[in-house]
Amino acid sequence: MSNRGLKQYTRQISGNIGDLVEYYVNPNPNDANLIIKFNMLKTVGAHSFDLGLIYNHQSKGRNDFNNGYGLSTNLSKRIIDNDGADITVINADGSRDIYTYDNSSFYYICDEIDQKIEKSIEYDDEDTEIKHYYLYDKEGNKVEFENDSEYPTAYVMKKGRIEIGSNITGD
């Protein structure tokens, strides 16, 4: 069974249970799935933030992001670097986005969702390779990952930078 997550091209039944829960049901027999998003925290303003817990029924037997079987936060993404050929991003809902390298722009591009990834490699004092991945959306916001981390190290938005584990700084 192929997990397509919350892709736009899949037929889904969706709804809300109060203000706290959103659900999505994909009734297609080839990749049927139930995704439930529990909205935990949502802020508004210059540094708006949305935190939710996502249950993916197709992942019920896996503890992918160490939040419990089938559970992940909406901030979770896993970067799989396929040695330069392409980069796969596994989203919290289980969907996969494939980014292919574009020689003219030097970015990995995913046309389906209009996003790109910049990859850089640096070495520390012990010659250990550290990979940095920068995911850009079409508005120019950036999410930074280091190596194969499941969670971003920073969010850089037009209004400021949010570093995980530190204070919010504005531009």
Image: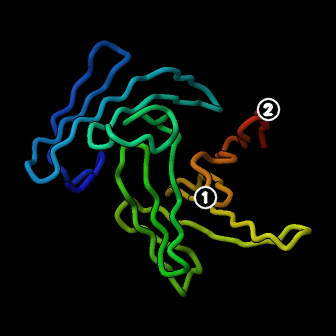
Image location (x, y in percent) of residue 131:
69, 67
The front one of 168 and 133 is 133
Mark 1 neighbour class, 10 Å CA radius: few under 14, some 14 to 19, many 20 or more: some
Q: Residue at x 39, y 23 (%)?
A: 38
Image location (x, y in percent) of residue 15:
22, 26
Q: Quadrant of residue 90?
A: bottom left
Q: Which residue is mark 1?
A: 148
Q: Quadrant of residue 60?
A: top left
Q: Residue at x 79, y 71 (%)?
A: 122
Residue 49 position (above or below residue 58)? above
Instruction: Point out the image quarter for the N terminus.
Output: bottom left
Residue 79 position (above or below residue 160)? below
Q: Residue furthest top?
A: 18
Residue 62 position (above or below residue 80)? above
- Mark 2: amino acid: Asn
- Mark 1: amino acid: Asp
The front one of 161 and 74 is 74
Total numbered labels: 2
Image location (x, y in percent) of residue 169:
79, 37
Q: How is the image coloured?
A: rainbow
Q: Residue furthest front?
A: 61
- In this rendering, would 171 be left or right of 35? right
Q: Residue at x 61, y 69 (%)?
A: 118
Q: Are discs 1 and 2 less than 8 Å apart at CB?
A: no
Indicate the secondary structure of the residue bearing disc 2. loop
Q: Which mark is residue 167?
A: 2
Indicate the secondary structure of the residue bearing disc 1. loop
Mark 2 neighbour class, 10 Å CA radius: few under 14, some 14 to 19, many 20 or more: few
- In this rendering, would 16 be left or right of 110? left
Mark 1 vs mark 2, CA separation in Å: 24 Å
